[in-house]
Image (cartoon, rainbow, N blue to C red):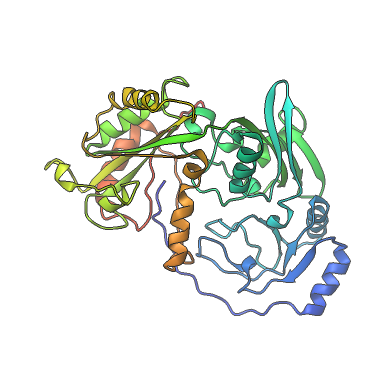
Amino acid sequence: MIACLERIVQDTDADSIPDDDVSTLSESLDLQGTIESGGITSVAGKDFGGLYSVKPLALIKPSGTEDIARVVNAASRTSHLTVAARGNGHSINGQAMADGGFVIDMRSTEENHFKPLTIDGSHYIDVSGGALWEDVLKRCVSMFRLAPRSWTDYLSLTVGGTLSNAGVSGQAFRFGPQTSNVTELEVVTGKGEITVCSETQNSELFFGALGGLGQLGIITRARVKLQPAPDMVRWTRVVYTEFEEFTRDAEFLVTQEEGESFDYVEGFVFSNSDDPINGWPSIPLDPDHEFNPAYIPQTAGSVLYCLEVALHYRNSDRPSTVDTAVSRLLERLGFIQRLKFQLNVSYVEFLLRVKQAEEHAKANGNWDSPHPWLNIFISKSSIVDFDRTVFRKMLKDGVGGPMLIYPLLRSK
């Protein structure tokens, strides 16, 4: 995954629709929720990517699924109106916007569904498509000591938003993406019909909506698989100079049986320099940790590689037991032995690790800057050439953001 695309976009001058038109629109749609004018400077006219800015006709804040269905149905009966579902606005290329159309604020429905279920001995949670994953995490852990199995790195995203894409993080090698960890959806179709779907009921819509980028329906409810939540995580980062050794070890870890490997495996590329964002200082997990470049071999190239792993454990586990389990796995890897960084954190703290980066970016004003981002799948047979051409040459000085790279199993 590489952040390497940037565009310059000219804003267009546009005025929001008059208040009396908003009132007329609200009456005609007969919504229980609210409607706001959609000026180009409003929240509905931009997204996290910051590459585009458009003027929607209106921002809809539905009270529930019925409101969403009414809006979509009304738009479907016109020749020009478009509809976009906006979760937390983290699309990159304007997917959460609708130029001259309706933007539906899914966050207004976040409390509509939160119901635990046990079916044939397995645990699930029914949650709203507008709920944030970080809230689902906190509530499930604190109330039931359970948690979803598969995550994204950043959890201030909505359930419906990530399920409309994929939802990939360091657990995907074990459980697949988030789209593989739901068993039932409630979807508003393009005709404004409310439909419940699963693998066995309306299956074409089920598999179309999952990863369908919101183009085959708006996900308003999802039934998510749960598992017992661990208490703690041993979080580890280790550094490599050679790409082939880095990929060999990462591929080894993701092909081991459950219980014989780490519970989370990711990796990233960083610049072999003292750059505070792209280089050595970005690796330590704790302010008290120091990255000593003297341990880097003289033969190292322009970039280095970091393998990031995590092992779950219980508060009742002895520290020596955790140490032994982690050491047994690490001793099989070929990283630079003196460039190893470890930290024990709570399970919730680990999953919310990117939240700290968000708070720091907001404090220094970078959060509202453009965020071009590119996710691509590359075959195992081509990855060494990709590293040689892209990472070591084109991006050797970094991109001012993360350059993540880690293996996924085709079977997942």
> Closest to the observer: 286 or 72?
286
| Residue 391 position in % (x across, y down) | 29, 47
> Closest to the observer: 362 or 49?
362
Picture residue at 82% right of the left edge, 47% below the top:
193
Picture residue at 81% right of the left edge, 76% below the top:
21
Above or below: residue 172 compared with residue 403 = above
| Residue 11 position in % (x across, y down) | 54, 75
Residue 341 occupies quadrant:
top left
Exactly how many numbered labels are in the figure?
Answer: 0
Picture residue at 82% right of the left edge, 79% below the top:
20
Q: Is residue 163 visible?
A: no
Residue 392 appears left or right of 143: left
Residue 379 appears left or right of 226: left
**Among all residues in the image, which is located at the extreme left?**
298
> Closest to the observer: 383 or 288?
288
Residue 371 appears left or right of 77: left
Q: Is residue 11 visible?
A: yes
Picture residue at 60% right of the left edge, 46% below the top:
133
| Residue 389 position in % (x across, y down) | 27, 45
> Closest to the observer: 206 or 361?
361
| Residue 274 position in % (x across, y down) | 22, 55
